Amino acid sequence: MFEFNPYSPEIDADPFPAYHRLLEEFPCFWSEHAKMWVLSRFEDVARALDDWETYSSSHGNLMDEIPGRAGATLGSLDPPRHDRLRTLVQSVFTPKTVQGMIPPSVKVATECLDRCLEKGQFDFVDDFSSRITVSVLFDLMGLPPTDHRAVRQQVILAISTNAELRRKGPENIAGFQYLVQYIQDQVAQRRSRPAGTDLISGLVAAEIDGDKLSEQEIVMTSATLIMAGVESLSSFMTMFALNLHDFPFERRKIIANPALMAPAIEESLRFNTSAQRFRRYLMRDVELHGQRMKAGDFVCMCYGAANRDPRQFPNPDVYDVDRPPKRHLGFGGGKHLCLGTAVGRQVTAAVMAEFLKRIPDYQRTTPILKWNSSTTFRSPSGLPIAVA
């Protein structure tokens, strides 16, 4: 009997055998463990992401939602509230802002690589990817460097899930509450002094035709940006490095032809991205593949499976940097396409170009990786490697 249990360590470590079963045998599957339907085929997931009136985000988009978050963030709002908030946030988070993140990212990457090469063996997460993302994001948001470690630890807690409880545990909720209080204090500081040039100050001052962000919107948007920048971007860089390790022939193609960096990033987003599963709430009954999903049910949008759907991608289990461009769901889709797509692509491209220039060959020093416990995201908690 087939089961899909997103709380199992086996799914954290390798979800793809289960995804194959979902894709071929159970394209609309009720997971008793998750208490929701699971959609796995690309066409079904893409269509659902475009139909926000049926598949609503208003009850939270994380597989296990954090109390107080649903309906208060970009990812957990539907139009028109979503569109208004996104417009205001984008007035601050501009292409110029993204471009401004690249030089400091490369600078920090270079400093990290100096230390990594000196040691010979290092952890890609602790010594490279997370140091870059935390440092650059904190600088962008005007946060004290002394808070790097404490904030990152709480972010990891907030995005994790208590597998035994099959929901967010007290430690996960406390991690998010810490983050919210931390941002509230930062916003209060911005209001008590003249506006600065950092991103939080920009959100406080953001205004379009007299419309401004509320206090809750500023805090929740800032918290979301920190969670995405600190952990999601670091996790994607780590998964990219892991993919390039596991497919050395493709890695050597990029080294020989740097123009392949951009398609390689797209292929990593498709092949094995950190954003694996998000949920929606059904506003009306839907019949699909012989199953009747009822209004009020939760539905899992299984990006990780959809990106391996052979109906959309020939030879989907092969990592191929020469793959012809085709829409994938590495950043989601529809109204809730990730706001940080440009950051994810451009910062990763710049940082990994520097990494491959300095360390073209590297080896994992352990055959078994430890994976973060999360029903929504997938990433190793560490990636120990040695310079070859």
Image: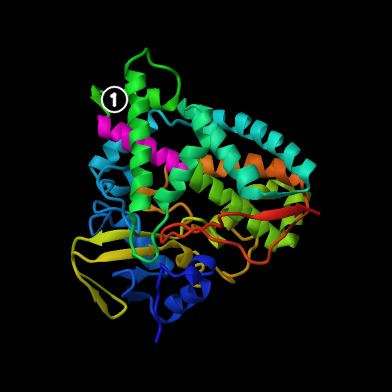
**Front residue of 80 and 172:** 172
Q: In this view, does 279 lie above or below 233?
A: below
Name the image colouring: rainbow
Determine the residue positioned at 46% across, 38% down: 151
Residue 179 in the image: state x and y as whole percent. Answer: 38, 39
Q: Is residue 267 above or below residue 207?
A: below
The quarter of the displayed image where residue 43 is located: bottom left
Quarter holding the C terminus is bottom right
Residue 123 in the image: state x and y as whole percent. Answer: 66, 50
Q: Main secondary structure of the magenta part?
A: helix
Determine the residue positioned at 49% across, 67% down: 312
Residue 257 shown left or right of residue 304 in the figure: right
- The residue sitting at the bottom extreme is 1
The quarter of the displayed image where residue 313 is located: bottom right
- The residue sitting at the front extreme is 170
Q: In this view, does 34 lie above or below 118?
A: below
Which residue is denoted by mark 1 in the rendering? Answer: 208
The quarter of the displayed image where residue 54 is located: bottom left
Task: Give the secondary structure at mark 1.
Answer: strand
- The residue sitting at the top extreme is 194
- Amino acid at the residue labelled 1: Ile
Quarter holding the N terminus is bottom left
> Is residue 161 visible in the rendered structure shown here?
yes
**Front residue of 193 and 55:** 193
Residue 300 in the image: state x and y as whole percent. Answer: 34, 64
Answer few, some or many: residues within 10 Å of disc 1's Cα (few below 14, many 20 plus, some between 14 and 19).
few
Which region of the structure is painted magenta? 214-229
Q: Is residue 295 above or below residue 131?
A: below
